Amino acid sequence: MQVRNCQTLKEPKRTYKRNGGQIMTYDLNITFDDNLVTGNKTIDTQHKELIDRIQNFVIACQNGDSKVKAIKLLDYLNEYTDFHFKEEEALQEKAGYPEREKHYEKHEEFKKTIQELYEYLQEYEGPTDRFSELVQKNVIDWLFGHIKTYDRSVAKFIFMKQNPDRC
Ligand SMILES: [Fe+2]
């Protein structure tokens, strides 16, 4: 079964050739760049992988790849999200980060979003306008905002703890 209506993700901004045919892509900015660096190597490396997996999932939808493939890519994303959050939470625990309970609650929000994505993929023929809004707001905007605030704060705390003479 094909995942349809991915074209509704956003207005097309560019096109590219794939398998000899012209496929539309959309300018959803799902790339790791310097604005997302927290300064903690472990966290930053994992964020790159997480964002790659989000990108692969969204591109599969944009390209109208099969529903089976979309679900498989969402499985990969889900699996890595769990791994990353556990790692990040362990870092906070180990460092005695005082705001960690609030941070863990935020992670739960994102896990709920992933479950919503599963529901969309299972209940519908493919992504709809609501799906594109969900990806933009609850995945991209949420994650990038979380990294720039919550995760950066953790990275700073760990750095200060490990380098008291440099602060
Ligand atoms: Fe986090």
Image: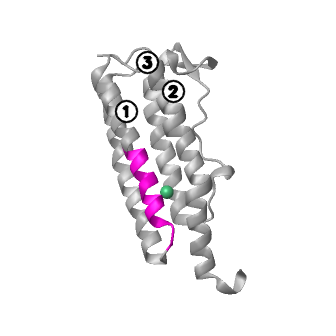
For label 1, the residue is 117
Going 48% across and 50% down the picture, which residue do you hit? 49
Query: Which residue is outermost to the bottom?
Result: 165
Inter-mark Cα distance, 1 to 3: 11 Å
The reply to whether residue 138 is visible in this rendering is: yes
Q: Is residue 105 left or right of residue 44?
A: left
Q: Residue at coordinates 46% horizontally, 19% vertically from top-left?
A: 6
User: Would you say the residues marked 1 and 3 are in contact, meaning their CB atoms lie under 8 Å apart?
Assistant: no
Q: Amino acid at mark 3?
A: Thr
Q: Is residue 69 visible?
A: no
Mark 3 CB in 8 Å range of ligand 1?
Answer: no
Q: Is residue 1 left or right of residue 92?
A: left
Q: What are the residue bounds of the magenta stretch?
A: 97-111
Q: Classify mark 1 as within 8 Å of ligand 1 or not, answering yes or no.
A: no
Q: Is residue 52 above or below residue 165?
A: above
Residue 61 percent location from the top left of the image: 43, 24
- Of callouts 3 and 2, the N-terminal one: 3
Quarter of the rendering containing residue 16? top right
In space, the residues marked 2 and 1 are separated at their CA atoms by 11 Å
Disc marking residue 133: 2
Residue beneath disc 3:
128
Check disc 1 and report its element: helix, strand or loop: helix
Say which quadrant the C terminus sits in: bottom right
Amino acid type of the residue tagged 1 in the rendering = Leu
Is residue 105 highlighted in magenta? yes
Q: Which label was assigned to residue 159?
A: none
Residue 128 picture quarter: top left
